[in-house]
Each structure stands twice: as C-alpha cells, then as structure tokens.
Image (spheres, coloured by chain):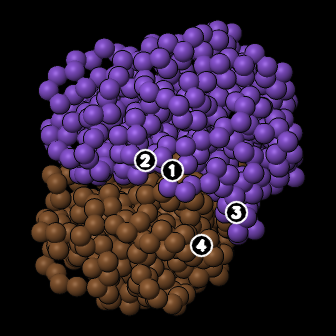
Chain colours: A purple, B brown
Amino acid sequence: MSGGTLLEAEIAAQPAVVEALLREQRPAFREAAQRARGAGVQWALIAARGSSDNVARYAQHVLGRFCGLPVGLATPSLCTLYGAPPRLERTLVLGISQSGQSPDVCAVLEDAREQGQPTVAITNDPASPLAAAAQTTIHVCAGAERSVAATKTYTASLAAVAALAAELCDGEELRRGLAAVPAAMAEQAGAGCGGAAELLEGIDRCAVTGRGPNYATAFEAALKIKELTALAAEPYSPADLMHGPVAVLGRSSPLVAFALAGPALASVLDAVGQARARDARCLLVSDAAPEPGEGVRVVPVVRVPEWLSPLVAILPAQALAAELARARGLEVDTPFGLQKVTRTV
Amino acid sequence: MSGGTLLEAEIAAQPAVVEALLREQRPAFREAAQRARGAGVQWALIAARGSSDNVARYAQHVLGRFCGLPVGLATPSLCTLYGAPPRLERTLVLGISQSGQSPDVCAVLEDAREQGQPTVAITNDPASPLAAAAQTTIHVCAGAERSVAATKTYTASLAAVAALAAELCDGEELRRGLAAVPAAMAEQAGAGCGGAAELLEGIDRCAVTGRGPNYATAFEAALKIKELTALAAEPYSPADLMHGPVAVLGRSSPLVAFALAGPALASVLDAVGQARARDARCLLVSDAAPEPGEGVRVVPVVRVPEWLSPLVAILPAQALAAELARARGLEVDTPFGLQKVTRTV
C-alpha cells in the first residue's frame, strides 16, 4: 500500500493502539465488570452511531456468546425526541463514540444512570460529555484520529468490548487470546489488501456479507467503502442476503465476503455460491484457505480465534477502501466534505 | 396505478386485510398481553428476517414508547450456529415471519420457550413451525401472498404489533386510533405513488430516510425498491445518514424521505436540507404539507396519529417500487428468481 495520508498512517497504527489499550485500560475493564456483576445485570443496551454502531454489533455477539447477555441496540429518539425512555432493570448500558460528543448517545447514558443502571463509556476522549455521563470510562487510547473515516478508534473499541467480555465472564483463555491479537494485526496490516481493489474497479455497487462476530465486519467494511469511495456498498448477514437483497448481485455488482473459519463459515460460503450462480464476482477475506477459482479472489487473513477475527479481518477492508478511493482520484482524509464530529440528537 | 399483477392486487388488498386482522385476532392480542403481564416482562426480544425485520424495527419504537419495554433484535446465529443462546429473564419473545418456516426464527422461539419465557408468533400461517413453537399465535389474516415481495403481510404484521402494544398498556385511545387506520389506508391506496417514480428514473441508487416509527418505513421502502427494481436503495435514520453515508448523495443519487408530522419531522427535514445542499433530488412522503420547491417533490399522505403512520406511508412506497419496476421492464411478481419462502439457519 502506498501511503502518506493520515488515513494510511492511522490504519498502520492499529496494532500499537490495541496493544496500548489492553495494557493501560485493564483497571477500567475490571471496574466496569465489577459494577455490572454488582448490579446483577441480565441485559445489555448499547447506544452508538456510525462505526461505533458496528462495534455494538460485535458486542451483541460476544456479550451474548460468552456472558449470556441478550444485547439490544438503543433507539435514542425515544429519549431525545419522544420523552419516552424505556424502563431499565438489571441492564448494563454502554455508550460507544470516538468523540464522545453525540448528544443522542449521551442522552441514553444519562437516562440510564438516572434509572440507577451501570453505565460505561467507550470513547477516545475521557474529557468528553459521554465520559462525564458514564460511571466508568474506557479510554480507547487511540491518540488523535484526524482522518474522517474511523479506523484505529474502530478496532480499539472492538478490543475494548472483547476485553470487557473477558472480564465479565472472568475468562482467562479469552484474555490470552486477546493478548495475542496485536501481533496478528501487525502481520496483517503489512499485507494491505493484496491488490484486491481491482475486483471492484469500474463497478458502482457491491454487497458485503459476514456472520457471527463478522456481521459487524461486514457493516464496517461497507461503511468504509461508502465513506471513502461513494460506491453503494450494502452489508447483510448471509441469511438476510438470501431474504431478498441477493436480487441485486450480478455481473456488475460483486460480493465481498468475510469467510472466517468457524461456525458461520458454511453460511457465508453458501452466499458466495448463490452470488456465483448470479455471475457476481466474489472477494473472500478469509483465513480458511478457500479455493480462488473462476470469479473468486481470496485475500488471506492471519488466523486468530474466530471471536477475535474482526480485529484482523477489517484491516484488508480498510486498505481496500483506501486503495479504491485513490484509484478513483478521491481525497481519502476528508472525503466529500464529511465532518469528523457529528452531533445528532 | 395500472395493474393486473399479483403484487398490485396484494397492495390493494391491504386495508381489508388490516381490518380483518383487527376484527378477528383480538383474542390473540389479549392472550399475548396477559401472558406477558403474567410473566412480569421487562424486555422484549424479536427474531425476524427480511420485511419482518422491519416490522421488528417498528416494534422497537412502539413497545418502547407506549409499554416502556426496551426491545432487542435477536442474533439467531447464537442459537443456531454457536450453541450459546443468551439467558433470558422476564422477556417477551416475538417471532415474526409471514411463512413461519425459517428455522433460525423458530430456533429463537423454541429456546425462549424452553427458558420459560412468554413467546408469540406473528405469522400468516397458523399451521407453520413458528406457530407450533410459540405459546400464542397471532394470525395476520392476509390470505395467500403469492407475489415474492411482501406487502400485505408487512402491513398486517405492523398492525398486529400496534394492537399488541395497545393491549399491553391497555390503551383505549391507542385502540381507537388503530381502528381508524384501515379507512385511511384505503384512501391512500387509491392514490398510488402520484407519478413520483419519474424522480427515480434513470438513476441506479438512492438513500431512504425516516425516524421514530418511520425508521421501519425507510427500511421497508428501501427493501421493496431493491427487491423489485434492483436499484441500490440504502436506508438510514437521519442521524445515521449524517454520520457518513450522506457522502453518497448527489445529482444522480436522490433521497426518499418519510417526513411525517411528529417529533421526528425536524430531523428528517434537516437531512433533506443536507441532501439538497449536495444537489440531490428529494422525494418527501409526507402528511405535513411541506413546500415542494426546487428539486423537491412531495407525495401527500393521509394523516393518522404519528405512531400509526407507517401503515399508511408505506403504501406510496410500495406503489413507487412497482411502478419503477414496470418502467424498467422488470417482472414484479417473481423478481430476479427470488423464492417466496426462505429457509435460513
């Protein structure tokens, strides 16, 4: 990957950021987990927007799978516009926002705290309103993120969620797995996207799919592609793709599939088969060594335990989005006049 | 609207279907509400795919707003692939599926029932596996739906959720409002999409936005457009649109906005303003009589209480999708070889 942009520097910084987060924030993970256990939480509720909403999708998987918690994504408008915040009992409430500035996310945390629920902010600014609203703040330690498209704050927030899940279920094996991730990320980051951008050149739309923990990866990859290249990139679980949107795949509408080894792999490969039957080209981001074959290109991913693979598998997708933007002659650091901090209510 | 297709007959049938549902299923609404109250539910969890997932988005709003229940959307893969269903306590679990056949939706209900939670199926087939899995079945009374794109089962399922919310909070005013909806739908259905399809002719993508109860409408309208026309139609709340995807709006990428009178209207109109600033044409589906103006076209909607507006506002969007498909020479009843019943795990 050629470089020189803020975005590419921030993509390259991710392994070190995740390492710093894991080293420095363990007291915060522990405090959050203690408060949650002390409150006897049976549910989690998450308020987030944009890339942070994709972190929330990851949290749905890991908090459900390892901690047995059903996880809801908050509908902030019930707090901010309708004056009808749901009643919360035994609920761990997380607010995720790199800037910590969005009033709607803060409102959900403030309301939850008034209702006596344990509240946690995951943010890159410990002096932000979101941090002030929460009882416990996990600082994602990413340093200033100056490119509009979030990269290092996304993976650092994923790592914060993974670490919180490990503390909540007191999982030593989970912690050990997580500790090995920065090295795998560093190895992956060096490979860029392996020239895969050529698969998407000349098209104006694509679908992106992933499942299990990589449902989040599909959404985040699609968002990066949209933000940086203005391509119409639509994310789906393989199951949702089959319930209708598979209709839009075809010769000029390829599929990007996160095909990581684990229980979700077969359904992702099924979707790839359906896409090939419609003559759509497929790009597989995979640690499972699938056959490339006619119309199928594979970007290899460094293998880590499946639940942690979103931290590694997003890296080639970020590089892909940046390379596509460059190929299209677009400005990658401030695409399309977007603002870094978005204050929605 | 010209006709003769199954789809158009099913679109036209919606007011009568909703009327039949409200007349015939009140015992089921009451039974479901009694079981939920008896179990002291504090949360709701919903399993659904495709159009039914958009019904779930509507349920998040109305069950939160009127019944104080936080609502989570289930991640079925935790049940079907990971063997790790979350622990449920005091949780009302809804499965929504017109066919009632999807194994992943059934698995969530079966697991919830084993965990002793109250379970409700909302389905068009009371003999389906989903109905067998649930304690209470609400039959949406839509008759056979033969067009692949769901229309009458979507609005009937919305009405079932609205009626369930009214019973859960014993809201006589809510029930009265709902009883008046079929007449408003009949008036609306006669107007088709008012020729608005021309705004989307010749483009290959658009964004769709709505908030509050019409967040669901934005997702369902986008799904209909995708299923029937293969246009890339991307749904967002206005807040999510501002956090990045606004980048893709422009001269060849218009915005369809559900601008219904109520607390969410201002933020929808803000998004319209941002879209206009990027030179994107805007189609407003609205009961709030906004000015059409340069680049803005308005499809008028019959006014009902805001929480019920999704039942009326989706009708012009369904007609729009059908008209666009016809203009593009596409088959509307079985588009792109999609199957009516999709069995995902």
Q: Secondary structure at mark 1?
A: helix
Give the mark nearest the N terminus, 3 or 2: 2
User: Where residue A294 appears, x then y in whole percent?
Assistant: 14, 26
* Residue B147 x, y percent position in the rendering: 21, 64
Q: Position of residue B150 (x, y in %)?
A: 30, 63
Tag 1: amino acid: Pro
The residue identified by callout 4 is B270
Name the front one of labels 3 and 4: 4
Relative to residue A324, is residue A67 drawn left or right?
A: right
Which of disc 2 and disc 1 is earlier in sequence? 2
Could you give the CA–CA distance between mark 3 and mark 2, rounded to whole angstroms?
30 Å
Q: Position of residue B260 (x, y in %)?
A: 54, 79
Q: Are marks 1 and 3 on the same chain?
A: yes
Left or right of B99 on screen, residue A167? right
How packed mark 2 is, by other alpha carbons closer than 10 Å (few <14, some 14-19, many 20 or more), is some
Residue A330: which disc?
2
Q: Quadrant of the C terminus of chain B?
A: top left
Residue at figure coordinates x 45%, y 79% from the top left = B284
* Mark 4 belongs to chain: B
The answer to whether residue A147 is seen in the rendering is: yes
Seen from the viewer's position, the closer of residues A124 and B116 is: A124
Q: Amino acid at mark 3?
A: Val
Distance from label 1 to label 3 (Cα)? 23 Å
Please state if B135 lies on the left or on the right of A285 as rendered: right
Task: Residue under label 1, please give it.
Answer: A335
Q: To which residue does mark 3 refer?
A: A345
Q: Chain of mark 3?
A: A
